[in-house]
Amino acid sequence: MTMAGRCVAGAAGLALVVSLMGCSANGNRPGRAGDSPVTAAEAMGQAASRLRSVQSYQASVSVSTVVGSTRKHLFGEMTSRSKDQALKYDVPFFDKDGNAISDSTQILLGDRLYIKNQVLLEVIHKSWIGIPLGGLKPADTHVTALLAQIHQPDPLLHARMFTASRDVHLVGRETTGGTPTTRYQGTFVLSDALARLDAPERTEAQAVYGPFGTTPYFEVWIDDHRLVRKINIVSRRGAKHRVNATVNYSTFDTPVSIAAPPSNDLENLPGSATENIPI
């Protein structure tokens, strides 16, 4: 799998066509029963505030990319638990030619990244490798690309980035995954959004949003409890370079299972030792 492919594999989907009739840049939306209507910009802030208290979520991730004449599409499933910052990501594993040849599981647990795929079994004779993150070096870019991939579905990160938009506006009410939501769309300048984050978050967000260019376009569906139920992010670099990311959030604050792999089927390696291993 190419480095560019890894950087975008964690999040994408098909762009949606929307009607802007009757919507203004500061359009209001109905709040929940008893709430006062809020502007679209306020809705972004409220969603970011609400997501800070979320303890777990599950999501499906779709990615569609166009680079030159090459088009790719893949699908993954994400599970996240906040109390120990645990993440589990199930995605296809690609060979060097970009062909999906097996499933891959990536688990981020504490300061260690675990990776499983069928090819590892053939190379190191174990299903999993464990990579300590504390000793990563600047040259370990293949590992940092995977970390960006696994963080891409984070709804709080996206909501915070969207608060930097100067043109976010209401589109209308829609049902998303069986849940009533309000749909918004807009753009933001990446450098403006990054400036709102502290240094560690800025590094993560730069890796996540890098493939989408300097001014990403986004759509977001927010339910009546101010939870983000769907996002769509699109790069606008022209017809020959497009990245479309869609994340659908199916559950929030339900029990999830994320555990380290069995030690007898695990090979621990430093990041530098994985450069020539298919991960």
Image (cartoon, helix red, strand yellow):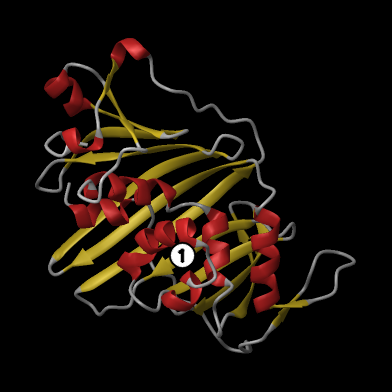
214, 183: nearer the viewer: 214
Q: What element carries label 1?
A: strand
Q: In which quarter of the image is residue 214?
A: bottom left
Q: How crowded is mark 1: few (under 14 residues within 10 Å), some or many (20 or more)?
A: many
Identity of the amino acid at label 1? Asn
Q: Residue furthest top?
A: 264
Vertical order, 89 against 20 (above or below): above
Residue found 23% across the figure and 77% down from its top? 239
Spot occupied by residue 196 in the image (x, y as percentages of width and height):
54, 70
Spot occupied by residue 5 in the image (x, y as percentages of width and height):
23, 54
Spot occupied by residue 204 in the image (x, y as percentages of width and height):
42, 56
Left or right? Give the position of 114 relative to 101: right
Residue found 69% across the figure and 71% down from its top? 43
Left or right? Give the position of 56 relative to 194: right
Q: Name the residue under label 1.
A: 232
The C terminus lies in quadrant: top left
Left or right? Give the position of 216 relative to 122: right
144, 173: nearer the viewer: 144
Vertical order, 109 against 200 (above or below): above
Left or right? Give the position of 39 relative to 206: right
